[in-house]
Image: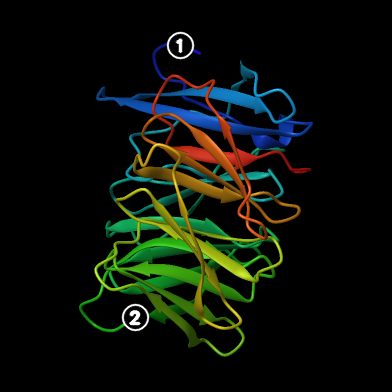
Amino acid sequence: MTSSILCDSDPWFVGNRRRWSGSRIASGLTAQIGLPRFLLIVLAAVFWLSTGIASAQVAIAHEAESQALRPVFSPDGAKLASAGADGVITIVDLETDREPATLGDGLGGLVALAFSPDSQVLATARGNAISLWEFAGATEVRVLQAEPGRAISRLAFSPTGDAVAAVIDGLEIQLWDLRTEGLSVFLSRPRDTVTEVAFSPDGRFLASFGSGPEITVWDLETQQEFLTLLSPTRAPITGITFSPVGETLAGADEDANITLWDVGSSRQTVLTAHADLIKRLSFSPNG
């Protein structure tokens, strides 16, 4: 499918998954145009899993300055967090007309944002440190740190919110237990890179991918590799996400395929209706 969106001057568009219903998965392609106030264009394709047919869907969220990070929705769909190159975090309340709230010290260098499952805490990463911000008091409540000299590039909360996973130096995955604030899990494969991570809905598995065609599924109970999945054409993986129900893992690759794997059986279904490079995936709430 080929689609385009024409934006007027300032507004930028993002898909709000609260508006999606039915058994479908959405993929998006974003493009940033270098203007004083930029246009962020999202070309969104929604795949109906029963037919593999794609259709487009977008929604206006809010106006923003140039972003160093992609914005993220809270799980309840009520908030949108974004961060600029100066490191200031903007929180937009999508359900009221309140002025956007701001967090952070403005020192720049933020590389990752992630909401907790209850939408009450935002995790941010800079250098080797993870900051946890509570919305109730709009304050930084905790700081977790990797070893000095290490660099965190991605964050993800566990489904229960009691752990946060971080990609370290693009090579390793570390999990912090937020109840004790101590490191609880360390995962790595020799000579493998790590770009993104995603938890299964029951918290048993953590999936990761790097620069190649492989997705590694880790069993967090044993802290061992459970399964390795390959893209159908051996094209590098570009995005992953678990269905919110069951054990279905979706992966996108550079050949514009979306593959659905059943983690328990390794059975796969390939969706090929998308024509553009896919960078992000998201299931509808009912999977």
Element class at badge 1 = loop
Q: Residue at x 42, y 42 (%)?
A: 70
What kind of residue is marked 2? Ala
Q: Horizontal and vertical percent for residue 100?
A: 55, 43
Residue 39 occupies quadrant: top left
Name the residue that disc number 2 marks.
146
Q: Horizontal and vertical percent for residue 2?
A: 46, 11
What kind of residue is marked 1? Ser
Q: CA distance from mark 1 to mark 2?
A: 42 Å
User: Which of these two is toward me, 173 or 49?
Assistant: 49
User: Which of these two is toward me, 35 or 20?
Assistant: 20
Q: Residue at x 79, y 43 (%)?
A: 286
Numbered label attached to residue 4: 1
Q: Residues within 10 Å of mark 1 (few under 14, many from 20)?
A: few
User: Which of these two is toward me, 217 or 115?
Assistant: 217
**Picture layout, residue 233 above or below residue 5:** below
Display colour scheme:
rainbow
**Picture layout, residue 240 above or below residue 274:** below
Q: Quadrant of the C terminus?
A: top right
Mark sitting earlier along the chain (1/2)? 1
Q: Is residue 186 left or right of residue 227?
A: left
**Picture layout, residue 128 above or below residue 208:** below
Q: Horizontal and vertical percent for residue 118?
A: 70, 61
Numbered label attached to residue 164: none
Q: Horizontal and vertical percent for residue 102?
A: 48, 52
* Residue 55 in sight here: yes
Q: Residue at x 62, y 86 (%)?
A: 179
* Residue 99 in sight here: no
